[in-house]
Amino acid sequence: MTKRAPRDAREGPPSIPFRSIADATYDWESWLSPEGELLWVNPAVERITGYGVEESLAMTGYPLPIVAPDDRPRIEQVLQSARSGSSGNDVEFRVLRRDGGMRWAAISWQSFDDEAGRWLGFRTSIRDIHERKLAESRLHEALAVAEQAAAARQAFLANTSHELRTPLQSIRASAETLLSGAVDDPAAARHFVEIVARHAERLARLTQD
């Protein structure tokens, strides 16, 4: 990659074409110098972070103070990449809002040249993805609940199958013995009938449960 000469800061910030369109852009747009100094930011910053344009311009280390502490190393890498002239897309991080809340966002960045090919630094575009992340979280929770329910159902069916099989086998064996005519003793026959009655009662309880 051909090394581009950074713009002389003494020349003052260049004009931004279509400034009114940039200011009205829904995403949080920023323009930073080759050294990483914030030169311009659109009003969307306040909607997403709670910090206004002037507050952002006066902020030391922008945008790191607005980034959740755990995510700052990731955004530092993004800024380092941008200062080297590289571009990238959709790195997710959490915004630390002025009111103390957190919102998920995704940052993209690219180099910024003027018509003469002078390197003006880089722009960042940050999208609010909070609702999407919440929906993903709810989906993951629902899937986890469904998996737990499926596992519980499987365990229930396995246990119920075992609980039903044992009394059914006893009832079948006793009935077959009685039907075979091999039992002549009334006391013995009563014993098998009692087995049938006892296990039938067990099945009734299982069905009710």
Image (cartoon, grey):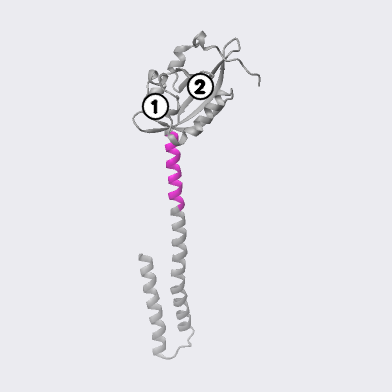
Task: Give x and y (percent) for residue 51.
Answer: 37, 23
**Magenta range:** 131-147
119 versus 62 height, above or below? above
Toward the viewer: 70 or 166?
70
Residue nearer the viewer, 6 or 15: 6
Question: Which residue has dot 2 on it?
Answer: 36
* Residue 28 x/y as whole percent: 45, 23
Q: Residue at (47%, 20%) from the top-left corner?
A: 30
Image height check: is 99 above or below 138? Answer: above
Q: Residue 7, how many percent across, how many down?
A: 56, 13
**Magenta: main secondary structure:** helix
Whether the magenta-drawn stretch holds residue 144 is answered as yes
The picture quadrant where one finds residue 187 is bottom left
| Amino acid marked by disc 1 | Thr
Q: Amino acid at mark 2?
A: Gly
- Seen from the viewer's position, the closer of residues 43 and 161 is 43
Q: Position of residue 163 (x, y in %)?
A: 43, 69
Reading the chain from its start, which is encountered first: label 2 or label 1?
A: 2
Instruction: From the image, tell me which residue sits under label 1.
Output: 49
Mark 1 Cα-neighbour bin, 10 Å: few <14, some 14–19, many ≥20? many
Residue 133 on the magenta span = yes
Write the residue at 38% across / 72% down. 202
Mark 2 crowdedness (10 Å alpha carbons): few <14, some 14-19, many ≥20: some
2 and 1 marks in contact (CB < 8 Å): no
